[in-house]
Each structure stands twice: as structure tokens, then as C-alpha cells.
Amino acid sequence: MSRVYNFSAGPAVLPEEVLKEAADEMLDYKGTGMSVMEMSHRSKAYDTIIKEAEADLRELMNIPDNYKVLFLQGGASQQFAMIPMNLMKNKVADYIVTGQWAKKAFKEASIYGKANKIASSEDETFSYIPDCSDLPVSEDADYVYICENNTIYGTKFHTLPNTKGKTLVSDVSSCFLSEPVDVTKYGIIYGGVQKNIGPAGVVIVIIREDLITEDTLPGTPTMLKYKTHADNDSLYNTPPAYGIYICGKVFKWIKKQGGLEAMKEHNEKKAAVLYNFLDESKLFKGTVRKEDRSLMNVPFVTGDAELDAKFVKEAKEAGFENLKGHRTVGGMRASIYNAMPIEGVEKLVEFMKKFEAENC
Ligand SMILES: *Cc1c(COP(=O)(O)O)cnc(C)c1O
């Protein structure tokens, strides 16, 4: 067996320990004589799995009691609609557009009400986070929306926007559990888990209880009401059961590493290895304004599309997978999520140095 260093933006690398445990339990989960995949979601064994997953997540993120944790389906993209359908009481919401995902969420919200783009960094290919200290937040805005870590462009909000008292809704798909967060600052924190937590098919929504109401937009399907899932502890219908089980294992793995403080330290160390090299390299350059850099997604270029392609090809041959940048930006991107070991980044930098010496 040989494992590559997988720099994919998502679905992405998972802790080897978790995969091995899941493999060990594949045919017989803890004496049940069946796989978690084959198990009723109403069984006692599964009830323990989902309850423990929630309890561990609550502990990791220090989630207050007045927030619900929902394990849903439909990916982060379904939340682009679910959020306005459930929250747009005044039919007004403000969006800060810092990349493709925020832009898609903004467009989706426009279907349901008046979505205002109150800030954007599209003028410079989303390579920075706009100043959000004094934005023209709408008086009757139901919420202010951000994408906290921009997976494609490699930027991150290091300071949350001043929402002037309005509810903050944040897509944290690509920075989920990468560092400590203050949940009380948000109305909703949500993310697809396939970037930093688990297999595709699960989206986790952490939502303040007062935002869960019957008062949704007319025509909102039962399955798209937060209340449906909150009232049934994410078991209104069959949840993405196996995916939640893996997420639960990852939560335990993070706890074992020392929790989110330790995760942050590990992620900062890893990112510094790559950014420090990019800052001194004669060939490679980071594409993001320094103070807005993400710890998770690191885009870089040589400035020559042919050389970029050569790099991606040779890197792949050397065991570094998925370094090609997003199709909308080109160049390279190394996603270095929680489960990427520091050796992976160190070896990548060694390889980049060698490539630079050969091509510069
Ligand atoms: C990947 C990603 C999405 C889309 O996720 P899906 O689960 O494919 O819908 C949305 N937002 C961010 C920040 C992402 O990284």
C-alpha cells in the first residue's frame, strides 16, 4: 500500500488513523455483526454514534446550549437556498462577496428576496478580504453573509465583519475545525464536511435557536426547514449515516490531537513552511495579500502557464497529488487541511526548491 500526499481542495485528505479504524469496523461494527452502512438509523448503535458525534463537536467548538447542531445533506450549496428560505423574514440580506462560493450564495438569495452586495473583492480576482469595519449594512437586513475561508482564492477573514448588530451567517466549509471559533458571534455557522472533516454527503449547520421558526418563506419544502431537522435531532428522515459516523471519528481524532488550539498551532506551523518559501522563492509566488492568507488553501503561480502545467505534472509523478489550481484561476493550489501532516508540506517545499533550481 502506498499513500500519496493529497493536496486536494475537497473531497480531501482524512486522518489515516480514522480510515484504518473505519476499515477495521467495516464488516462488524463493535459486535453488531454489520457495517455502519447497513445499520438502521433508528438502532441503538447508531443512536450512540450520532449523539457522540454531536457531543464531541459541541465540546470541540464550545457550542452554547442555545445553538442546535444539524447534520444535513445537499452540501454547502443547498444552504445557499436554505438560509434565505428560513431567515429572510424582511426579504433583505447583505452579502460580502469574496469568491465564487459567496457569489453563488448571493445569486441564490436573490431568487428569494433582495440580496445586497455590500462589499466585494472581485476587482482584484478575489485576492484579498475587503475592509468590513464600517459597511453600509441594510437597516432591515435579516442577516449578513460571508464565506469565511475562500477555498478557491486562498483568503480568510481574520477579523469578522462589523454587522452592526445583524445576524452573521458564515460558510466555513474549508476552515471548519481548523482553529478555535467563538460560536456566539454567529447566527449560523455551516459547512460541507468534505474539505476538513469527513466524506462528501454531510453538511453541518450550527444554528442559534431563535433563528429556527415555522415562519419560513411560503412554499419552503419540509426538508428545507431547519425546524424539521432541529425538532427531530437530524433524524427526520434517513441522515447521511455513514458520513456522520466518519465525522464522529474525526472529531475524536481532533480531540486526541489536543482540540482546536492544537489544530491551529499545527496549521500555522504547516502554512508557515509553505508561505515562507513562497516569500523567498525566485520562481513561485503566492497570489493573496499577505494579511488575508488562508491557513488551509494556498494558491501560487510561477507566472508562466506552461511552467505551471509542467510543475503540476512533475509533482504528481513525485507523489504530490491535486496541486492544480481551480479551473477559474489556473496556477497551483495546495490545500493543507487538518489531516495533512507537516512532512507533506516540508516534502512539497523540498520538491519546489528542486523544481526551481532546474527551471530558473
Ligand atoms: C466546496 C465549497 C462549497 C460547495 O460545497 P458543496 O458541498 O459541493 O455544495 C461551498 N462553500 C465553500 C467555502 C466550499 O469550499
Image (cartoon, rainbow, N blue to C red):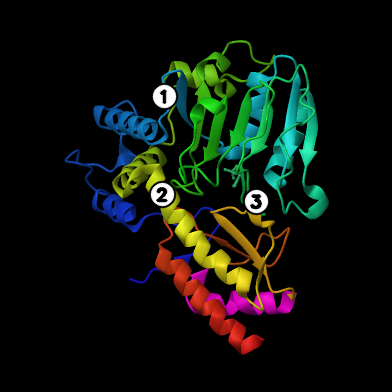
For badge 2, the amino acid type reads: Met
Q: Which residue is mark 3?
A: 292
In the rendered image, residue 224, in percent from the top left (x then y), is placed at 58, 24
Measure the alpha-carbon separation of dots 1 and 3. 39 Å
**Principal SS element in the magenta part?**
helix
Which label belongs to residue 263? 2
Disc 1 vs disc 3: Cβ atoms closer than 8 Å? no
Disc 2 vs disc 1: Cβ atoms closer than 8 Å? no
Pick whichever of labels 2 and 1 is earlier in the sequence.
1
Between 349 and 76, which is closer to the camera in this rendering?
A: 349
Residue at the (74%, 43%) spot, across then down: 130
In the rendered image, residue 84, in percent from the top left (x then y), is placed at 68, 24
Which label belongs to residue 235? 1
SS for callout 1: loop
Report the magenta residues as a range.
305-322
- Quadrant for ligand 1 reads top right
